[in-house]
Image (cartoon, rainbow, N blue to C red):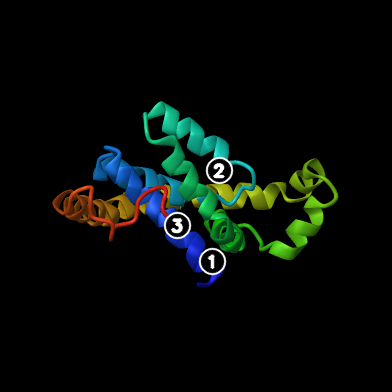
């Protein structure tokens, strides 16, 4: 089995295992929706702390939300430039020469240096994300809740002794 597929299967099994541990489908859907959206915040190094704060403030499952936000790292990198462009468009700012490769090169010169150089791009991306985040979270929650509810019902109907369903500890 391909390593990425194996990794993804384990993460999904861990999330489904939470349904067996008494996490309601609605709360799990909220954790996953917030984890996806916050995990794609276009400001590097912010998502872990923000997800922790949200989970503690709203009494959400911290491992679930962190698992999801951490798995968003590839898409977070891919969405930085589109968020910068959307923010520039929203704020009617001229486009800056921004790319993931140039951002990584700047980071190698130091985080504070990169923040200074990319300050406007970070603000533009942050404004765009703040606009997109609430409806994206709501939409994901509305999509995931019935999926997790059906899964929980199937798992409850199958009983805990059915080995065909993945558990949090299974590979």
**119 left or right of 154 in image:** right
Q: Bin the neighbour count of mark 3 within 10 Å (Cα to Cα): few under 14, some 14-19, many 20 and up.
A: few
Q: Residues within 10 Å of mark 1 (few under 14, many from 20)?
A: few
**Quadrant of the image occupied by residue 113:** top right
Residue extending furthest bottom? 1
Res. 100 in view: yes
Left or right: where does residue 138 sit relative to residue 118? left
Q: Nearer the viewer, mark 2 or mark 3?
A: 3
**Tag 2 near tag 3, CB within 8 Å:** no
Residue 6: give x, y in percent of width and height.
49, 64
Do the residues bearing badges 1 and 2 touch, measured as CB atoms within 8 Å? no
Outermost residue on the right side: it is 109
Instruction: Looking at the picture, tell me which residue is in the foreground, 36 or 16.
Output: 16
Q: Find residue 84 and report its horizontal and vertical position in percent.
A: 60, 58
Q: CA distance from mark 1 to mark 2?
A: 22 Å
Residue 22 placement: quadrant: top left
Judging by the rendered image, the residue that carries numbered circle 3 is 171
Q: Does dot 3 land on a helix, a strand or a loop?
A: loop
Q: Residues within 10 Å of mark 2 (few under 14, many from 20)?
A: many
Disc 2/disc 3 C-alpha distance (Å): 27 Å
Per the image, the residue denoted by label 1 is 4
Q: Which residue is mark 2?
A: 47
Residue visible at 44% across and 47% down in the picture: 35
Q: Residue at x 50, y 72 (%)?
A: 1
| Residue 97 visible within the image | no
- Distance, label 3 to label 1, CA atoms, is 13 Å
- In the rendered view, tell whether residue 54 sits above or below residue 106: above
């Amino acid at each position: 089995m391909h390593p990425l597929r194996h990794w993804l299967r384990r993460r999904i099994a861990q999330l489904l295992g939470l349904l067996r541990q008494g996490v309601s489908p609605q709360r799990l859907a909220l954790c996953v929706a917030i984890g996806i959206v916050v995990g794609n915040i276009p400001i590097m190094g912010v998502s872990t702390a923000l997800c922790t704060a949200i989970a503690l403030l709203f009494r959400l499952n911290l491992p679930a939300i962190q698992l999801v936000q951490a798995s968003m790292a590839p898409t977070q990198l891919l969405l930085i430039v589109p968020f910068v462009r959307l923010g520039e468009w929203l704020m009617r700012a001229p486009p800056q020469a921004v790319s993931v490769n140039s951002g990584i090169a700047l980071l190698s010169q130091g985080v504070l240096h990169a923040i200074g150089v990319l300050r406007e791009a970070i603000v533009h991306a942050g404004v765009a994300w703040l606009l997109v985040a609430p409806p994206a979270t709501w939409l994901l929650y509305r999509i995931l809740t019935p999926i997790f509810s059906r899964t929980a019902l199937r798992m409850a109907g199958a009983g805990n002794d059915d080995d065909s369903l993945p558990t949090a500890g299974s590979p």
